[in-house]
Image (spheres, rainbow, N blue to C red):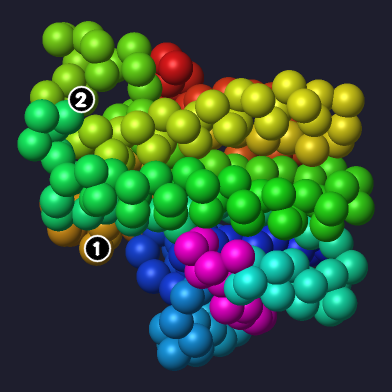
Amino acid sequence: MSDTNRIALVTGANKGIGLEIARQLAQRGVFVIIGARDPGRASAALEDLSAQGLAAQSVRIDLNDPASIAAAAETIAAEHGRLDILINNAGIVDAADGPPTTSSSEAVRRIMDTNFVGTLAVTQAMLPLLRRSAAARIVNLSSALGSLTLNGDPSSPYYSARLIGYNASKAALNMLTVQLNEELRDTPIVVNSVSPGYVKTDLTGHGGFLTAEEGARLPVKYALLGEDAVSGRFVEASGQTPW
């Protein structure tokens, strides 16, 4: 399947890495659907892309609102009939998150509900459309902070980043990648966890090392994997990340 024939949904694509992923996919000729909670922000993102001559549309999708997820799937089915790429990018952090001894349990619940349960709900809703594709790709935006190996390694730069809610949500997302890959192994659907790195976005308080444009490159690469695509991997720019 050529890039120009592909249809992609990017959740949380109204800003940050999500918007840059949408931009880079559209630059490759992919028709991009921006998933966003706020219609106003979605419109602003569409105007941003349109100013560069890039075609896209938006659907309202809130990972904590099952009705919006179902409606988004119905809209995509009615207008396109299938989905070739799903990029599960939407996610949150919470100021009340922290080490297990001090983190707010309510903050952890909010993070898990959005980053994991919400992503699972979106994936389940979009799977019937992905099954209609000749070569569907699912990219779960993970983080090295979700690696159990690195969280337990005192020599790792991530060892001191104890955010029980966020880290656990990304570890759970990786479990989704592992189990979904096994469940879909006899289908053309490929699924991978991709860590974009420490990116300067609202999510990180703009304290990262990479620009959103740089952080979007690896997710886009995995969204556009060809016939020799690998599946069930956890990767970052430097290579495979330990689970």
* Residue 199 appearing in the image: no
In magenta segment, residue 129: no
Q: Residue at x 39, y 45 (%)?
A: 112
Earlier sequence position, callout 2 versus callout 1: 2
Could you say which quadrant of the image residue 209 lies in? top left
Residue identified by numbered label 1: 202
Judge left or right: residue 75 versus residue 80.
left
In the rendered view, tell whether residue 38 sits above or below residue 97: below
Which three-letter amino acid code belongs to the residue tagged 2? Tyr
> Residue 176, image x and y in percent?
58, 33
> Residue 125, image x and y in percent?
72, 56
Q: Residue at x 79, y 59 (%)?
A: 83
Could you say which quadrant of the image residue 165 lies in? top left
Q: What is the magenta range?
A: 55-66
Residue 158, numbered label = 2
Secondary element under disc 2, as helix, strand or loop, is: loop
The residue sitting at the left extreme is 102
